[in-house]
Amino acid sequence: MMTNKIEGLEAFVVDKPFETWFLNYAGSVCSEFLTELRDNKRILGIRCPNCNRVLVPARPTCARCFTQTKDWVKVSDTGSLLTYATAYQALPCYPVQPPIIYGVIQLEGADTGLVHLLGEVSPKDIFIGMKLRAVFNDERKGDIRDIKYFKPIESP
């Protein structure tokens, strides 16, 4: 490979904000899942007709057996914590102050885990198997962040 240097030109830096806009098509299955979150504060899964697993979030194809999914299933907004991680650095894409706790929650009625934020809990109080409930944002836009976070369910 050959490169030619252009003589007499120097590199320069422009200090100016640069914005880009992206459109992402969620597809018909994910769109239905997100629409239910936004409009009804309801979490839907989708059942694989081959292996009978309920997938949350809903996906058009089962990752285990590669069968096209089709039957919608209402799942609970409560579930159990399968695993979690704590981040101590702020992220520009999610305006939550550290510590930021991410969990994988298996909702009642689902066979897969949903990755989401945990809230109203200290990292020292978290444990695997903890029962959690979804907290929805008052203003919803049709994305996964319509669920603000999952919080612990108080013991009776």
Image (cartoon, grey):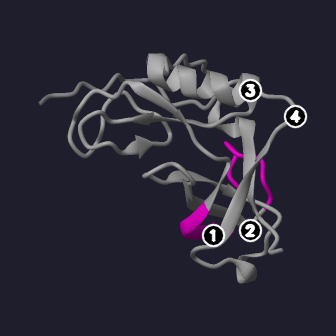
Amino acid carrying label 1: it is: Thr
Question: Which type of secondary structure does the marked residue at label 1 adopt?
Answer: strand
Residue plotted at (30% across, 38% down): 62
Residues under numbered marks 1 and 4 in contact, where contact means CB atoms less than 8 Å apart: no
Q: Circle 2 is placed at which residue position?
A: 99
Q: Residues within 10 Å of mark 3 (few under 14, many from 20)?
A: few
Residue plotted at (43% across, 23% down): 8
Q: Circle 4 is placed at which residue position?
A: 138
Q: Circle 3 is placed at which residue position?
A: 40
Q: Is residue 5 left or right of residue 46?
A: left
N-terminal of the pair, mark 1 or mark 2, is: 1
* Residue 87 within the magenta-colored segment of the rendering: yes
Q: Of the residues tagged 2 and 3, which is closer to the observer?
A: 3
Instruction: Assign the C terminus to one quadrant of the image.
Output: bottom right
Q: Which mark is residue 86?
A: 1
Q: Is residue 96 left or right of residue 114?
A: right
N-terminal of the pair, mark 2 or mark 3, is: 3
Q: Position of residue 77 (x, y in %)?
A: 68, 47
Q: Of the residues tagged 1 and 4, which is closer to the observer?
A: 4
